[in-house]
Amino acid sequence: MTLNYDVIVVGAGHAGCEAATAAANMGAKTCLITMDMNKIAQMSCNPAIGGIAKGQIVREIDALGGQMGIVTDATAIQFRMLNRSKGPAVWSPRAQCDREKFIWKWRETLDSTPNLDIWQDQAEELIVEEDNGKKTTTGVKTIWGVTIKARCVVVTAGTFLNGLLHIGRKMVDGGRIAEPAVKHFTESITRHGIRSNRMKTGTPVRIDKRSVDFSLMEIQEGENDFHQFSFIGQHKVLKQLPCWTCYTNKEVHNTLRSGLADSPLYNGQIQSIGPRYCPSIETKLVTFPDKEQHPLFLEPEGENTNEMYLNGFSSSLPMEIQINALRRIPALRNVKVYRPGYAIEYDFFDPTQLQHTLESKIVDGLFFAGQVNGTTGYEEAGGQGTIAGINAALKCGNSAENGDSNSATNKFILHRDEAYIGVLIDDLVTKGVDEPYRMFTSRAEYRILLRQDDADARLTEKAYNLGLVNRERYDHWMEKKQGIDNIIRFCESTHIRKDEINSALESLGTTPLREGCKLADLVSRPQLNFKIIGELVPSLKETIEKLPSRNEEIAEAAEIKMKYKGYIEREKMVADKMHRLEDIKTKGHFKYEELAQLSTEARQKLSAINPETLAQASRIPGVSPSDINVMLVLMGR
């Protein structure tokens, strides 16, 4: 049996779903291959979307016409904006989701996407043809003997490629718990000269909430303001639920240490590298032996389930050790679990073998996205899937009707000053990975340009020109843009007399006016915001309330643009200067181990490699753009 498509997407995780919908929405006839149609977009680890820098990526996916933000808003059971105590450049949305409803909302989305078919099967072999030394993929063969032909293949296989599960000394083949591993597919790719390696990740125990004493835990409520992920999605559809916090203790640690001899991480069973920034509980004990406690976060898995996720307790220790340790925590003394935590090893492919479009440099028409590129996280996967799907569709000739300049070359690339997704992909293809890659705001040197509030300003018009965003969505953005401009114009043209506001300014602890000023000058003061000023200047409040929709979201975007105008303009200038790094020599210039301004990881890796130039330093894994900026300043540049 033979099927014919423009684009094949192998794997229906977060990368695969975004890749498939992006390609299909651009007009490419697309086939999404998945082993289990009931586990599409499964949240394999924690039931949450977003977080530090990850939330920005989700907003960017949404602005590009992707689905993750819309699905998250429709299934969210708690929302929070992280980093509120800091500047808006690092504000990051995060939502707990109903795991099962998330899957079915995605399934509903896929089923209603034109040009998209789902095929339940397992890819076993990548079909590659060679002509005069040029290798080109023409499709895949499945374990059921089906040949599916296409011009482009996007591989988004997650942790399934030769996946191996670990609990204590017990090892079982699998891509996730109780799901089979994919054999042979890696080998069908590497035989064409594409390098693969192994990585490790893990997940915590799942707990029955009926066995938890919540009176001994601290409640962590969500937020109920206007914030959400999608610029157009539904707002807080489901019942909002709290999370809970508690801590490990010495007894817990002693119990865990008693099992280290049987830990796959320390008995030689696991050779691959795990995520530095999401370590297992046993890694925390070994790395931080003097810490007497570690925080744990108990998170609901859904509206109508007793299953809860214990964030902070990822482990692959023997299951009896895990459970006995948990019972040393007062709130969990009678705990019952649905299953223990486990580790998983899996294949990934060296991302330095990819172009910025995520197409292979070795096999034409072959794209990779998600954990197969060495990343970790649903959000990083979704961002890559979006870009891979767009470029696969462009390669098949499904370019925009609206004249995007990128589409003329059949490539769509986001640069580091345009999106966190651009930072992510540039890091992968330029620096490669030696551990699972996780996005942080510190990795982006232009983070005040890449805020969560302005993702639509940066990307929606690009998406419209690509054909990813329909006219209704584009008009929604233009309406918002007009609202932002109207508020800024009002503030820049409205004159305030000192006698009508000085007493209020003094009571708020900010300097009174010596003379009248424009309202915009007051907005720039750190002690003041639109809410406060609106009470003092009713016409501002009226201007905001007259906006046709989502006036709070529009007002926040306008206020940030005004309040941080100087910083934004300065960062744009820095972005221009940062393109001149190739000629700046660094070898012999620094004693990296003495530079306290750099992160510990950067000092270690810069000392080991001793790069020739600042450009080379910027490509070393673990050296962030912020570290490069520090070096640039120390060199007087």
Image (tube, rainbow, N blue to C red):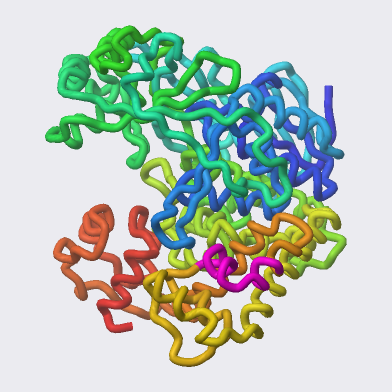
At a point 66% along the width and 62% down the height, the residue shown is 554
From where the camera sits, is residue 627 visible? yes
Task: Classify residue 442 by image quadrant.
Answer: bottom left
Q: Which residues are magenta?
A: 529-542
At a point 41% along the width and 47% down the height, the residue shown is 433
Please say if 597 is above or below 195. Answer: below
Task: Classify residue 1 by image quadrant.
Answer: top right
Residue at the outermost bottom position: 515
At a point 71% along the width and 62% down the height, the residue shown is 545
Quarter that holds the C terminus: bottom left
Identify which residue, 80 or 407, lies in the foreground.
80
Is the magenta region chiefly helix, strand or loop?
Answer: helix
At a point 63% along the width and 61% down the height, the residue shown is 413
Q: Is residue 82 shown left or right of residue 552? A: left
Residue 562 percent coordinates (x, y): 56, 74
Whether residue 240 appears in magenta in the rendering, the answer is: no
Residue 136 percent coordinates (x, y): 69, 46
From where the camera sits, is residue 183 visible? no
Residue 215 percent coordinates (x, y): 35, 19
Identify which residue, 137 or 453, lies in the foreground.
453
Identify which residue, 488 or 141, lies in the foreground.
488
Please say if 93 is above or below 567. Answer: above
